[in-house]
Image (spheres, rainbow, N blue to C red):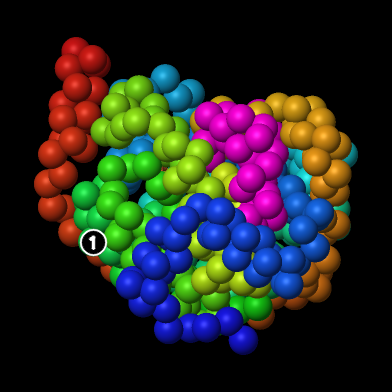
Amino acid sequence: MPKQNWTRAEILDIYNKPLMDLMYEAASVHRKHHDPNTVQVSTLLSIKTGGCPEDCGYCPQAARYHTDIEGNDLMEVSHVKAQALRAKASGSSRLCMGAAWRNVKDGEDFEKVLDMVRTVNSLDMEVCCTLGMVTENQAKRLAEAGLYAYNHNLDSSEEYYKEVISTRGYQDRLDTIDNVRKTNVTVCSGGIIGMGERIEDRADMLVQLSNLNPQPESTPINALVPVEGTPLEDQQTVEIWEMVRMIATTRIVMPKTQVRLSAGRTQMSQEGQAMCFFVGANSIFAGDKLLTTPNPDVNEDMALFKALGLKPQKAFEKGDKPVSKPKAQTEHQPLGEKPKWSRPGHKIERNEAAKQKAKAAKL
Ligand code: SF4
């Protein structure tokens, strides 16, 4: 069983090792638990873009910031099916559907998402959703529809989270993960580096993730892609060495988890990405867009796989295909809940400044 009581000090000791020692150790752990030449490929599809009421400092989809995102209402199920087939044909074993919502609300849109889950599951692909906060009942309904994974990132440490987001609290994230854990849906949770956090915050985030019981089945590690108009637009891009250290440390503290090299790959060289695979990254997002930020072209990824001798992981290689119940046979019905997710509402200076800038731009 993976160790469950990591401390900040222990994780910092790992993160700060001489790089060659760190890479060697992480690669050794990786080889013990995974086939080092297999990488899981997911396609991330934005099923509802923009207009989000939250204030995540990194996100161009927050309605309050002025970015050049083109918003869209919830996609049609037939469109999702077509995109899923395209993703499958280009080597993806998982479709991750993202909606720019604060939380899931019972109603027509959620019913449509449940239909999307049933449809993609029937194509023999792993289905993942990232829809914001969910209640236990909603998680159970997603599970009954055939959801394989639910993504809900912790983003950073609890302390630094308050410097990035003011419209919800860290505990909401943990509660949502807990709700998902009450079903057989797997948990995907990770974070973003390069938002101005300290190394200690990165370590604290890994303390939280690695001490979840069980540890997440997958953990995306994102490098911030600074987008004009967002509060974090002026952040420096993350150096490859930081990314390698973060991936390697994640691999060591969460040996069985699929570690996903996520946003920020366009900022990395192919050699940098190869180092990330060597130290334990065994999943990527494919497709030219990650929700709204740029991502390498699928053909470029396949050329890299060929050069490195990597092969894409097959669907359901690490878990059984969930049974998808038709709507008429589902046990869990909408409860019409009105959950009280928190709204701390503290002022984050750079978020306020970006909001003011957006207001001025609209005048
Ligand atoms: S990250 Fe998600 S919740 Fe936050 S603003 Fe963007 S779409 Fe909304």
Q: Amino acid at mark 1?
A: Glu
Position in image of residue 66 (x %, y %):
31, 23
Q: Position of residue 269 (x, y in %)?
A: 61, 30
The residue depicted at 29 percent of the width and 27 percent of the height is: 234
Horizontal and vertical percent for residue 332?
Answer: 60, 77
Q: Is residue 102 above or below residue 355?
A: below
Is residue 318 found left or right of 245 in the rendered image? Answer: right
Q: Is mark 1 within 8 Å of ligand 1?
A: no
The mark tally for this picture is 1
**Residue 68 image offset from top left, x and y in percent:** 42, 20
8 in relation to 162, above or below: below
The secondary element bearing badge 1 is classed as helix
Residue 264 located within the stretch drawn in magenta = yes
Q: Which stretch is magenta?
A: 263-289
Quadrant occupied by the C terminus: top left
Q: Examine the structure image and report whether residue 70 is included in the region drawn in magenta.
A: no
Going by the image, does 186 lie left or right of 38?
left
Position of residue 302 in the picture relative to residue 133 (left or right)? right
276, 164: nearer the viewer: 276
